[in-house]
Amino acid sequence: MKKELHIFFTALMFYTRIPCPKNITHHPDYLNKASRYFPLIGWIVGGISFIVFYLSSFLFSNEIAVVLSMIAGILVTGAFHEDGFADVCDGFGGGWTKEKILLIMKDSAIGAYGAIGVVLLFLLKFQSLVQLTDKAQIPDSGFGILLLFITAHALSRLAAVSIVFTHEYSREDATSKSKPIAQNFTWKEVVGAFFFGLLPLFVLSISCWQILLAVIPVFVFRYFLARYFQKWIGGYTGDCLGATQQVCEVVFYLSAIALWKFI
């Protein structure tokens, strides 16, 4: 139990800005195992985002509450995944070889592709959340919306970390802080990631059975993103995982809207 707590806090420290015990470090052995808790981190980020949304909704309009919840999620993670998404937009938008793409993604400056991509991503996320929370399509809307936030963050992180289980790390050097989680994994990492990634979805489906179908578009996008990364850079990087998480989160929101509208 003590070792599992250490692994969990390693994941919490790596993926968020939440303070952790002083004895927690980025030790490669623990980082390798931390991938099992990546979707669980989504529970925390989604829960905090919901709390901010719920409290803000008593004071402000639904739109402002959604924006504040998005800001909370970004602050909790330190824009970890959004930064990866922007880097992927710049790298794959401006590079035509593996070496050029990887070089651009390492650059800390954001380019036109990254800026445009992040703006469009946030617009989609904002409009989706406004529609999902304003129409109150979820039974027992308070608890249902909480589950919606948690499911989106957990499932999208599962989609991202599953790439680690099926593809090779692209960079040949040790310059990326994401490389330790890509070195090896065991069945415990796979089972843990899928358990924490899918559990909120199954709980939400008790009231809204059709939400289970959202798994299909999420993992379809995950498949094509991984295939695209494989084609151009021969695998993935930490930025690719961040981009996958962001894209799959938005895909989940859009899928939920479509499912509740047509089914």
Image (spheres, rainbow, N blue to C red):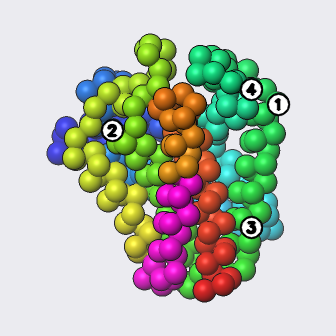
**253 or 103: which is nearer to us?**
103
Instruction: Give the quarter of the image for residue 67.
Output: bottom right
How dense is the environment of label 4, judged by Cα within 10 Å: few (below 14), some, or many (20 and up)?
A: some
Sooner in the amino-acid sequence: mark 4 or mark 3: 4
Look at mark 3 in the image and give the residue it sits on: 130
Report the amino acid beneath label 3: Val
Work out whether residue 46 can be spotted: no
Secondary element type, mark 1: helix
Is residue 78 depicted above or below 120 in this figure?
above
Look at mark 2 in the image and give the residue it sits on: 34
Foreground: disc 1 or disc 2: 1
Is residue 73 depicted above or below 12 in this figure?
below
Q: If the image is split into quadrants, where does the C terminus sit? A: bottom right
Residue 241 forms part of the magenta stretch: no
Residue 209 forms part of the magenta stretch: yes
Between the C-alphas of marks 1 and 2, the distance is 34 Å
Sooner in the amino-acid sequence: mark 3 or mark 1: 1
Foreground: disc 4 or disc 1: 4
Sooner in the amino-acid sequence: mark 4 or mark 1: 4
Between the C-alphas of marks 3 and 2, the distance is 33 Å
| Image-based side of 185 in relation to 51, left or right | left
Sooner in the amino-acid sequence: mark 4 or mark 2: 2
Foreground: disc 3 or disc 1: 1
Report the amino acid beneath label 2: Ala
Work out whether residue 196 can be spotted: yes
Report the amino acid beneath label 1: Ala
Q: Residue at x 26, y 27 (%)?
A: 29
Look at mark 1 in the image and give the residue it sits on: 112
| Image-based side of 18 in relation to 104, left or right | left
Between the C-alphas of marks 3 and 1, the distance is 27 Å
The span shown in magenta is 205-222
